[in-house]
Amino acid sequence: MKCPFCDELEDKVVDSRMAKEGEVIRRRRECLGCKRRYTTYERVEEILPVVVKKDGRRESFDRNKILVGLKKACEKRPISIGTIEAVTDRIEKHIQEMGETEIESRVVGEEVMKELHQLDQVAYVRFASVYREFKDIDQFMDELKTLAQQRRER
């Protein structure tokens, strides 16, 4: 592992612990060059589907794109980074459990929308306005009315 401080390639593992219910191993490392410590995480490399974009392009599934989108939607909301990462984990796991080799980007977006709808309605509307590409205020208001109606029905 290359040291993030001095680029030395030699290090030693000082401590290892399981994290995220045994799905990740957290390792504390000490650089043998500069003696500084840093943390790495190991997880099993899972085979995830290729994402088919609206225009037909294909790209590898990227969990980080989901995480970035969720962070933007949840910006300035009372939602912890831990919660956002847990939501990302659930979405990734659900997509993996589908067992598909290819998946439309629409499916990923709908999974994010479903999670945000349960998590925070303001974040949901923020994400929906970008994801559904609202063209005008009427589309935005229609989404808000639907959300308000669902809330009243609960």
Image (cartoon, rainbow, N blue to C red):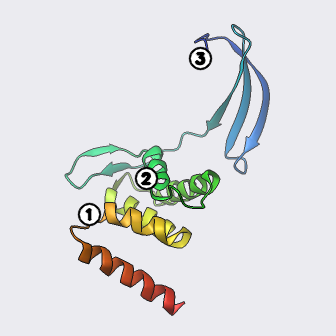
The reply, left or right, for residue 84 in relation to residue 54 is right
For the residues labelled 3 and 1, the Cα–Cα distance comes to 42 Å
Binning the other alpha carbons within 10 Å of mark 1 as few (below 14), some (14 to 19) or many (20 upward) gives: few
Residue 91 location, x and y as percent? Answer: 51, 58
Quadrant of the image occupied by residue 11? top right
Query: Which residue is nearer to you in this view: 25 or 72?
Result: 72
The three-letter code of the residue at mark 1 reads: Glu
- Name the residue located 50 percent from the left edge and 91 percent from the top edge: 152
The three-letter code of the residue at mark 3 reads: Lys
Mark 3 vs 2: CB contact within 8 A: no
| Badge 3 element | loop
Of labels 3 and 1, earlier in sequence is: 3
Quadrant of the image occupied by residue 62? top left
Of labels 2 and 1, earlier in sequence is: 2
| Badge 1 element | loop
Quadrant of the image occupied by residue 2? top right
The three-letter code of the residue at mark 2 reads: Gly
Query: Which residue is nearer to you in this view: 78 or 128?
Result: 78
Of labels 3 and 2, earlier in sequence is: 3
For the residues labelled 2 and 1, the Cα–Cα distance comes to 14 Å
Say which residue label 3 marks: 2
Say which residue label 1 marks: 133
Query: Which residue is nearer to you in this view: 30 or 142?
Result: 142
- Name the residue located 30 percent from the left edge and 73 percent from the top edge: 140
- Name the residue located 52 percent from the left edge and 44 percent from the top edge: 46
Residue 69 badge: 2
Binning the other alpha carbons within 10 Å of mark 3 as few (below 14), some (14 to 19) or many (20 upward) gives: few
| Badge 2 element | helix
